[in-house]
Image: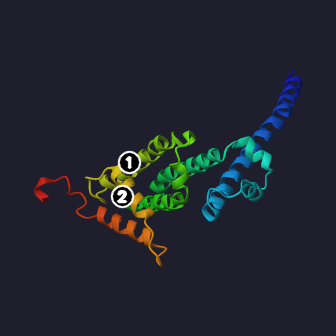
Amino acid sequence: MADHRDALDDGSQSRELPGRRRRADAQRSVDALLLAAKEVFATSGVDAPVREIADKAGVGIGTLYRNFPQRADLVAAVFRREIDACADAAPLLAGKYAPGDALGRWLQRYAAFIATKRGLASVLHSGNPVFNSLPAYFDQRLQPALRSLLDAAVAAGDVRSDIEPDDLLTAVGRLSMQEHRGRPDHAERMVGLLIDGLRYRAGQASDPSSC
């Protein structure tokens, strides 16, 4: 009986492997397309030929259209992927650095994300319904990520306590969208100054006697 069960198990696994392999291959193709699209959009803009993206990803043009029938689908997927990467960085930084340092590093990571988004701004606000869900997804993923870092930094006494995540997201976003000729690190420096400001009177902002 044991041999019979083993034979059945082996046969079952052999039947499942091709499907699993196809799914894994399909996911690798999607990952390659999103990475290639991000790089192409950054250098050539969102109107770059989709064949350039497919070639860079090492897949056929049919694979691109099968996964992303419209250019807007690809742009939205790239944006969601970048949101996810930024949100997922929060617990990784929290596990590696002290609370205040983790918060500062995440804000710089978020600033870099906003800087890459600059090239997508016009298309994201084009009115295409494909993009309608992105603002809610942005808040859903990034607000809790920042809240966890901010609460930990406040509890540690590293930053002031009268700051809301939305305030920081807005402030960093505006600083990151500014351009300064001759200073490619302008946004990074400005966000650094903002982070320094968060440390001013840390632990005292909610104390009326400190006013």
Along the viewing direction, whichever of 141 and 173 lies nearer the viewer: 173
Q: Quadrant where the N terminus lies?
A: top right
N-terminal of the two: label 2 or label 1?
1
Q: From this viewpoint, which residue is outermost toward the top?
A: 1
Residue at the spot of label 2? 171
Q: Secondary structure at mark 2?
A: helix
Q: Eyeballing the image, is 157 above or below 6?
A: below
Along the viewing direction, whichever of 157 and 83 lies nearer the viewer: 83
Q: Is residue 99 left or right of residue 18?
A: left
Q: What's the colour scheme?
A: rainbow
Quarter-of-image position of residue 21: top right
Identify the amino acid type marked 1. Answer: Arg
Residue at the spot of label 1? 147
Q: From this viewpoint, which residue is outermost toward the bottom?
A: 182
> Residue 35: percent from the left, percent from the top?
66, 55
Q: Residue at x 50, y 62 (%)?
A: 115
Q: Secondary structure at mark 1?
A: helix
